[in-house]
Amino acid sequence: MTPTRTEVPPPRGTARDASATPVVSVRNLWKVFGPKAERVPDSEELRGLTRRELLDRTGCTAAVRAVDFDVRPGEVFVVMGLSGSGKSTLVRCLTRLVEPTAGRIEFEGEDIRRADRARLRELRRSKFSMVFQHFGLLPHRQVLDNVAFGLEIRGTGRAERTRRAREVVELVGLAGYEHAYPDQLSGGMQQRVGLARALAGDPDVLFFDEPFSALDPLIRRDMQNEVVRLHREVGKTMVFITHDLSEALRLGDRILIMRDGRTVQCGTGDDLVGAPADDYVRSFVKDVPRGDVLTLRRIMRAPTDDDALDGPELGPHVVVREATRAVLAAEKPVKVVENGELLGIVGDEEILAVVAGREGDG
Ligand SMILES: Nc1ncnc2c1ncn2[C@@H]1O[C@H](COP(=O)(O)OP(=O)(O)OP(=O)(O)O)[C@@H](O)[C@H]1O
């Protein structure tokens, strides 16, 4: 897949508190499908094979290989990769919809791999929610009852679950459709019901498995904006799978890029575009409009004795596109300042280098 050139809004990757206890923490996670799968992560020799070699030698497919990452509280964490790269398997391991072969997964400090069935059921009912590509709505239930379904399973009384369902139906913009049936709604509206259902139980983490892939591009854009808005309003931690780079950049505070089961790079849009880890990532991001993603932190330089230091100030996470007017209009270089500390300066040269696609040269 070649990513198409799309207009990308400013990345959402303002630094969340990296020192906060992660909501989800994953270390050396493996998922191997096939006979005697456990021997693969245990064997140095097998670990070193490519996926193809491993399949030929052992009949096993290593869907997820030695993956590490943390999801920080309140962030939108995107897992991105082409078809077959292992993203669905990875995210399903987090809630143990797929049993991991090896590695450690903690949820709010709890070792998920040790959770028994009762505990897993409890976590899935009260802490995790999933939004799937194919909505998963119950056709014979009206919107309100679909949204309230999880609460019903949890044993919430009728009055309370109806109150809560109405609240989230309104939150996702479906007020007036409470009594419609799924087949009376468009795809985008059905996915709003899916979102409302996921939010109804007030989970700690929402997992999205390519939720908008089946929607046409305009509706898809609408739904992405909806997720951004909801995230701003409810501030939930979200783990979002996609194979679409512009979707990843639009939604993700940080993005983990997978290839053949492994992590290629994990970082903000600014990291991926400004410092791609390898040629694979470089080719992935080559058509992204750089000014929409790169931040002042990426393009700033150290001041010299000749630079005036009484220009206007901007924060390091401001994207170039948003800063362009201010920088070009200022008589003096813009100071990049965080918590009162001068990090660097940005002048016309640095901005124009981004516009010309040659920042970082020389
Ligand atoms: N149940 C299974 N048994 C055997 N192999 C599997 C199974 N599930 C997934 N795989 C293999 O694991 C690899 C990763 O699949 P996965 O579905 O996680 O990738 P993906 O990136 O989510 O792809 P897609 O976007 O197409 O869903 C693929 O090679 C797939 O064929």
Image: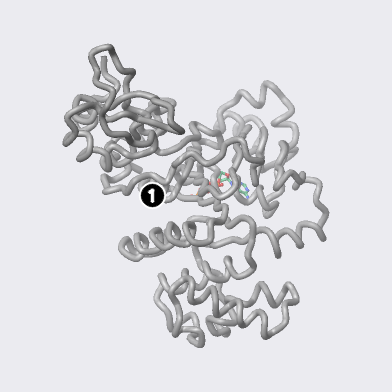
Question: Residue shown at 68%/74% (left/top)?
Answer: 151
Q: Which residue is mark 1?
A: 250
Question: Residue shown at 27%/26% (left/top)?
Answer: 310
Compared to residue 199, the image places residue 11 above or below, namely above
Residue 101, image x, y percentages = 72, 40
Residue with the most extreme bottom position? 179
Q: Going by the image, does 285 lie left or right of 166? A: left
Task: Identify the image quadrant of residue 58.
Answer: top right
Residue with the most extreme top position? 305
Residue 72, image x, y percentages = 59, 43
Task: Identify the image quadrant of residue 214.
Answer: bottom left
Compared to residue 188, the image places residue 208 above or below, namely above
Viewer-nearest residue: 278 or 36: 278
Provide the secondary structure element on which disc 1 rests.
helix
Question: Residue shown at 27%/33% (left/top)?
Answer: 312
Asked if the beta carbon under badge 1 is closer than 8 A to the nearest atom of ligand 1, the reply is: no
